[in-house]
Image: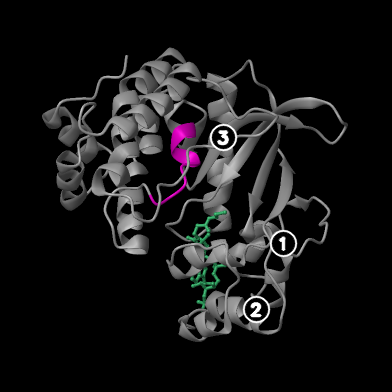
Amino acid sequence: MLELPSNAEAARLLERLGARAVDRAETLAARPDPRKHRELWRHLEGCYGDLMSRMGSGLPVDGYRGFPAMPVDANSVALHLYVWLYLAVLPETLRYHAERGIDRATSWETLSTLGPMMAEHRAVHGLGGIGRFGQWCPPLKFRGAEYRLGRLEYDRGRGELPDGTTGFLLHLHIPSGAPLSPEACDVSFDLAREFFGRHFPDEPVSYLVCHSWLLDPQITEYLPERSNIVRFLRRFELKPFISDDQEHADGDMLEYIFGRPSQSDPVTDGLLTELPQDTSLRRAYTAHLRSGRHWHARTGRIVF
Ligand SMILES: CC(C)(COP(=O)(O)OP(=O)(O)OC[C@H]1O[C@@H](n2cnc3c(N)ncnc32)[C@H](O)[C@@H]1OP(=O)(O)O)[C@@H](O)C(=O)NCCC(=O)NCCS
């Protein structure tokens, strides 16, 4: 049965999860009510049921969808609905982590991306909450599938191995923040080997996989070999690229590189002239699109 924490408990948890005062206050003011917000409450119950029934399960072989972003005209209760969802699930997540012998510091480090996500939502959309973001990583974190270990994040999952069989994999995520130095990546990979070997010995991992714009080798045409992004992408063996003009990452990269809302519409010349050009990557992004080409998210793997 879905039960929300009291306002006092929610405020305490939000602070622990790294939420700033303004985001804590707005969350409390946008507390959903089963009688007043019937439709939203039904969605909340559905998501809660989904997370609870999948507690501890990694990414399935046949895909994962997360929870959808709220519509553009969503009110404050809708924009904060997923925050309340995660607060409600949190005790169960901590219980699952404890059952796997995971220390509290790793639990909180993993879950504490919620606060920074609220700050990012405000920066990108000018609104409190997290509802304008599609919910991909947070549900995985709160169901015990994803862990933050040093600079990087890892999702437990299963997928096809190079020999055609199915096996355990870790899906790699690169949260924004500190530079992606090779040293920080090496430390994180070592932590991951130790962590998953110790807490999930029943899931022997053979590969790390990553799907990201950071793996687009076209970046090497613009950034030097010594840049962190190029050194990062050089670690991966890329899956062959099947040209498809429909599937490019131009719109998503607006968020990662310029802190603007991602979009599925084509990036117009008018928008390109507005984008700041103060880093080599920002200049690369713009020059590439101006030359009529596109950016692509690519998939790569590393032997674990
Ligand atoms: C991944 C990330 C930490 C790499 O940053 P980094 O370690 O500084 O990368 P590099 O050393 O390769 O940077 C090379 C140049 O690109 C710039 N750059 C790198 N990432 C940038 C970004 N997100 N926005 C704007 N400029 C960026 C750097 O400032 C540097 O510019 P300069 O040559 O003018 O000094 C950074 O891009 C980031 O935080 N991205 C957001 C998270 C993300 O995209 N995750 C993947 C989701 S699929």
User: Within 10 Å of the Cα at label 1, are there few (<14), some (14-19), or many (20+) other Cα atoms?
Assistant: few
State the residue lying farthest toward the right: 163
Residue visible at 78% across and 32% down in the picture: 160
What residue did someone put label 2 on?
Answer: 289
Q: Is mark 1 within 8 Å of ligand 1?
A: no
**Residue 159 percent location from the top left of the image:** 73, 31
Report the coloring of the rendering.
Answer: one colour
Mark seen at residue 281 = none
Q: Which residue is more in the foreground, 89 or 236?
A: 89
Q: Are marks 3 and 1 in contact (CB under 8 Å)?
A: no
Q: Amino acid at mark 1?
A: Gln
Residue segment shown in magenta: 132-140
Residue beneath disc 3: 155
Mark 2 Cα within 10 Å, few/some/many (few <14, many 20+)? some
Q: Which amino acid does the dot numbered 3 rest on?
A: Asp
| Secondary structure of residue under mark 1 | loop
Q: Residue at x 60, y 23 (%)?
A: 197
Vertical arrangement, residue 271 with respect to residue 195, above or below: below
Q: Is residue 298 visible?
A: yes
Give the mark, 3 or 1, whose residue is nearer the N terminus: 3
What's the distance in space between the residues labelled 2 and 1, CA to CA?
14 Å
Residue found 65% across the figure and 78% down from its top: 289
Residue 116 in the image: state x and y as whole percent. Answer: 33, 50
Q: Is residue 202 left or right of residue 176?
A: right
Residue 149 showing in the rendered view: no
The amino acid beneath tag 2 is Leu
Quadrant in the picture for the C terminus: top right
56 in relation to 266, above or below: above
Residue 246 shows which numbered tag? 1
